[in-house]
Every structure is written in structure tokens, then in C-alpha cells.
Image (cartoon, rainbow, N blue to C red):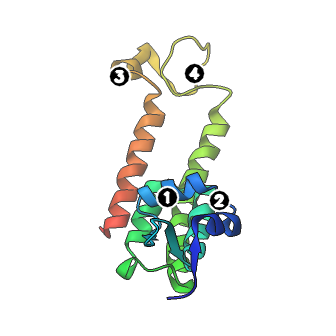
């Protein structure tokens, strides 16, 4: 094991607040051990782990998905270059799906919000007699698409 760092040193070097480091630790994203004086100490490889977490968060990956990805690494090790390639490729595919969904949303934004409301004169959803309203409350088409994407993402992660 390399040099050990205090929580303050990790915060300074990673650019992450001490409170965020404590939060990451409670979520199992990083690990520390306690000294005889009950102070947290981190191995220096935690800096790379925090960098992975920050980059993933910056592009919109949830902490739950980050935790799942990091937990998939053997023995909970810090990601290697090859690990980062694998993790980022998986996240890139998810980001591509989300970008496509956002582009579709943007294209239809001025004409409809996807809810089946009858307040718009010309509904591009072709929702005669408010049939989407009979399917339930909220933005029906968007909710169905999001649910379908979630199922597809879980299937892909499971290797089906």
C-alpha cells in the first residue's frame, strides 16, 4: 500500500469537499480505515477512485450506477486503465440513449408535453378523445419511453 492520506489531504488534492468524501464513504464508493487516534486514513489510490466518481457524476451517471460499476471490479480495487475503458464504454452507451431521448424531447417541446392534455389546439401526438388520459396521469408517452429504456438498460447490464 502507498502513502496514506488524511481526509483533508484527499479533499484538497481531489477538489471534493470533506462532507462529500464522507458521503461517498457511507455509500460504499470509497473506503478508509481509522488510526489509533480515530482519524480517517485513505490509501493514495482513493484519488483515482474519486476522480472516476466525479467524472461519472459530471456526465450524469447516478451514484447508484457508479457504485454498481465500482462494485463490479475484482476485490473492489481502484479502476485500472482497462477498467476505466470498460466502465466508460458502458456509460457512453447509456449517455447516447439519453441524448437521443433528449433530442426527441427538444424536437417536440414547443408542440406538446406528452401528457395527453386537450388544451393544445393541434396535438402532434394524435390523441383523439384523450385516449392517453385513460391510460393514467402524467406524461404518458415520456413515462412509457423512460420505463422501456430502463428495462432495456437492465437487460443489457444482465447480459440478456
Task: State the image coordinates of residue 155 (x, y, percent, origin top left).
Answer: 33, 61
Dot 1 falls on a residue whose secondary structure is: helix
The residue labelled by disc 3 is 136
Q: Which mark is residue 24?
A: 1
Q: Which residue is mark 4?
A: 123
Residue with the mark numbered 2: 16
- Callout 1–callout 2 Cβ contact below 8 Å: yes
Residue nearest the observer in this picture, 67 or 126: 67
Is disc 3 in contact with disc 4, using a CB cutoff of under 8 Å? no
Residue 41 percent location from the top left of the image: 51, 72
Circles 4 and 1: CB distance less than 8 Å? no
Q: How many marks?
A: 4
- The x and y percentages for residue 146 are 44, 43
How far is the residue under mark 4 from the one under mark 1?
Answer: 45 Å
In terms of sequence position, does the residue under pointer 1 or pointer 2 come before the other?
2
Q: Residue furthest bottom?
A: 1
Give the number of the mark in front: 4 or 2: 2
Q: Earlier in the sequence, mark 4 or mark 1?
A: 1
Residue 110 lies left or right of residue 160; in this view the side is right
Q: What whole-number distance in Å separates the C-alpha atoms at marks 4 and 2?
A: 47 Å
The reply to whether callout 3 and callout 2 are in contact (CB within 8 Å) is: no
The residue nearer to you, when weighing 49 against 68, is 49
* Mark 4 element type: loop
Considering the numbered disc 2 on the image, is that residue within a helix, a strand or a loop? loop
Q: Can you tell which of label 4 and label 1 is closer to the viewer?
A: 1
Point out the frontmost of discs 3 and 1: 1
Q: Secondary structure at mark 3?
A: loop
Label 3 crowding class (10 Å Cα cut-off): few <14, some 14-19, many 20+? few
Q: Residues within 10 Å of mark 4 (few under 14, many from 20)?
A: some
Q: Could you tell me residue 15's position as x and y percent?
A: 69, 62
**Does 138 sit above or below residue 102?**
above
Amino acid at each position: 500500500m502507498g502513502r496514506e492520506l488524511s481526509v483533508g489531504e484527499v479533499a484538497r488534492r481531489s477538489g471534493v469537499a470533506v462532507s462529500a468524501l464522507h458521503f461517498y464513504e457511507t455509500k460504499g464508493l470509497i473506503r478508509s480505515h481509522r488510526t489509533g487516534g480515530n482519524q480517517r486514513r485513505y490509501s493514495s489510490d482513493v484519488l483515482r477512485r474519486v476522480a472516476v466518481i466525479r467524472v461519472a457524476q459530471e456526465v450524469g451517471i447516478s451514484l447508484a450506477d457508479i457504485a454498481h460499476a465500482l462494485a463490479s471490479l475484482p476485490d473492489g480495487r481502484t479502476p485500472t486503465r482497462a477498467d476505466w475503458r470498460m466502465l466508460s464504454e458502458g456509460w457512453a452507451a447509456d449517455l447516447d440513449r439519453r441524448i437521443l431521448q433528449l433530442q426527441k424531447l427538444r424536437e417536440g417541446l414547443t408542440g406538446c408535453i406528452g401528457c395527453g392534455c386537450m388544451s393544445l389546439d393541434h396535438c402532434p401526438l394524435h390523441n383523439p378523445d384523450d385516449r392517453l388520459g385513460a391510460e393514467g396521469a402524467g406524461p404518458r408517452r415520456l413515462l412509457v419511453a423512460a420505463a422501456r429504456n430502463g428495462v432495456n438498460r437492465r437487460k443489457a447490464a444482465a447480459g440478456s
